[in-house]
Image: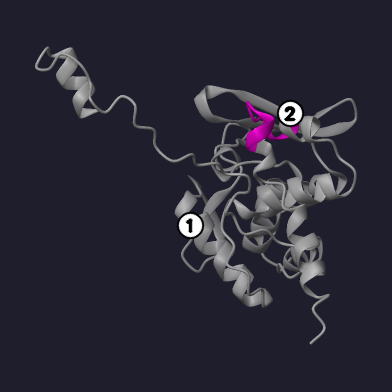
Amino acid sequence: MLFDWLVLRQVIVANPASPVRGPKYSVRKGKTAVLTAEEARELLDSMPTDTVQGLRDRALIATMVYAFARVGAVLKMRVEDVYVQGRRTWLRLHEKGGKRHEMPAHHLLEEYLRIYIKAAGVVSDPKGYLFRTVRGRSGKLTGDPLAQADAYRMIRRRALACGLKTKIGNHSFRATGITEYLRNGGKLEVAQQMAAHESARTTGLYDRRDDQVSLDEVERILI
């Protein structure tokens, strides 16, 4: 790059490093930690349902799992972004670049959102944020949106309380949902559409089905 710049500035006539090629780097699998279906179910079931905060956390995590949603898109959701169309609940997600992505809700996600919205009492505030912060120890929701860093801390706290040893983060649930969808016969191109990815190659980075195959093969070493 330096030599290219020198050529453009007419400091040198030709780039002596032009034949040099860097090593090829190919990423076929993402580094995001992924939960098994059993671990994801255990985490969701461990959420306390006697507090608004517990219902909020369960609904937030379920949205990322079942809608393949980025945490940033979920935290931008307004109450009106959960709506009914054709007798089904739909989600409106605000993705990168101002793109709007709509997804039908899984029946369990529909239930979690319904219970949370009713308990939070936010139906009358359609323009307000869906997932809000909690004021101190009062357990009452504010009008402010939950920050991404706070969502990460919540996830780590819930995972620890559940006894999960996998170091998961905000992105783990998107990868978990896509992996389980593909494991149960889903198509990569449909997963790409559901995840609002520009390329199927990006969606493929979330496919961790080979992890289980590798584990099964390792267990064949009977020593």
Q: Position of residue 108 (x, y in %)?
A: 84, 50
Q: Residue at x 62, y 24 (%)?
A: 100
Label 2 CA crowd tier, 10 Å (few <14, some 14–19, many 20+): some
Residue placed under numbered mark 1 in the picture: 150
Question: Is the residue 49 above or below the residue 101 in the image?
Answer: below
Q: Position of residue 41 (x, y in %)?
A: 79, 63
Q: Is label 2 in a helix, a strand or a loop?
A: helix
Q: Which mark is residue 30?
A: none
Residue placed under numbered mark 2 in the picture: 193
Prevalent SS, magenta region? helix
Q: Return the residue nearer the eye: 204 or 92.
A: 204
Q: Which residues are magenta?
A: 193-202
Residue 69: quarter of image: top right
Question: Is the residue 165 above or below the residue 96 in the image?
Answer: below
Tell me how far mark 2 sits from mark 1, CA to CA: 29 Å
Q: Is residue 193 visible from the viewing direction of this image?
A: yes
Indicate yes or no whether the magenta region holds residue 196. yes
Image quarter of the N terminus:
top left
